């Protein structure tokens, strides 16, 4: 489990560091919707705050609940990043243009490492 937490932390820190935040984001705060186990969400929240100095407002909910929240927010999104959860809600959110496709400017540089990770931001 510790190895899983460490890998998840590295994945989130890498993806968020490389991620250009949405127009609602500010340098002082990141709103994270987290759809994995609460202990993992809390660990990621603390690690990101420590690494970046950016305050994280984290909401833990299932993928279905998070999808419903994002859909309800529609044209006035409140969240910056949706991390984890099952694939179908992420795919549906993308098909409904509720999320944005992101490709880091460092993608080519880290292409080999990224092949091992599946991240839907």
Image (tube, grey):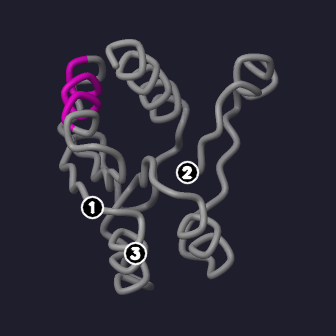
N-terminal of the pair, mark 2 or mark 1, is 1
x then y, percent, for residue 30: 28, 46
Kind of element beneath mark 2? loop
Q: Is residue 95 above or below residue 87?
A: below
The N terminus, quarter of image: top left
Which span of residues is magenta-colored? 42-50
Assess whether mark 2 and mark 3 are in contact (beta carbons under 8 angstroms).
Answer: no
Give the residue at x 50% y 27%.
Answer: 11
Dominant SS type (magenta): helix
How packed mark 2 is, by other alpha carbons closer than 10 Å (few <14, some 14-19, many 20 or more), is some
Against 104, residue 112 (above or below) is: above
Q: Nearer the viewer, residue 32 or 115?
A: 115
Residue 121, numbered label: 2
Q: Secondary structure at mark 3?
A: helix
Number of residues whose C-alpha sits closer than 10 Å to that of mark 3, classed few (under 14), some (14–19) or many (20 or more) = many
Estimate the x, y position of residue 110 in percent, counting from the top left.
73, 18
> In the picture provided, is 107 more to the left or to the right than 27?
right
Rendered image quadrant of residue 75: bottom left
The reply to whether the magenta stretch includes residue 45 is: yes
Q: Is residue 119 left or right of residue 8?
A: right
Q: Which residue is mark 3?
A: 70
Give the answer, above or below, for where 67 lies relative to 19. Answer: below
| Residue plotted at (41% across, 64% down) | 63
In x, y percent, where is residue 105? 70, 32
Of mark 3 and mark 2, the one earlier in the sequence is: 3
Asked if the stretch drawn in magenta spans residue 12, the answer is no
- Say which of marks 3 and 1 sits in front: 1
> Relative to the observer, which residue lies in front, 114 or 105?
114
C-alpha distance separating marks 3 and 1: 12 Å
Q: Marks 2 and 1: which is nearer the front? A: 1
Residue underneath mark 1 = 61
């Amino acid at each position: 489990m510790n190895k899983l937490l460490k890998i998840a932390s590295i994945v989130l820190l890498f993806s968020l560091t490389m991620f250009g935040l949405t127009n609602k984001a500010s340098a002082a705060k990141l709103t994270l919707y987290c759809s994995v186990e609460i202990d993992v969400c809390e660990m990621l929240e603390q690690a990101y705050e420590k690494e970046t100095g950016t305050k994280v407002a984290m909401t833990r909910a299932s993928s279905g609940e998070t999808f419903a929240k994002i859909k309800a927010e529609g044209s006035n999104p409140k969240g910056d990043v949706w991390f984890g959860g099952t694939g179908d809600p992420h795919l549906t959110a993308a098909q409904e243009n509720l999320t944005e496709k992101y490709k880091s400017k460092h993608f080519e540089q880290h292409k080999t490492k990224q092949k091992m990770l599946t991240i839907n931001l």
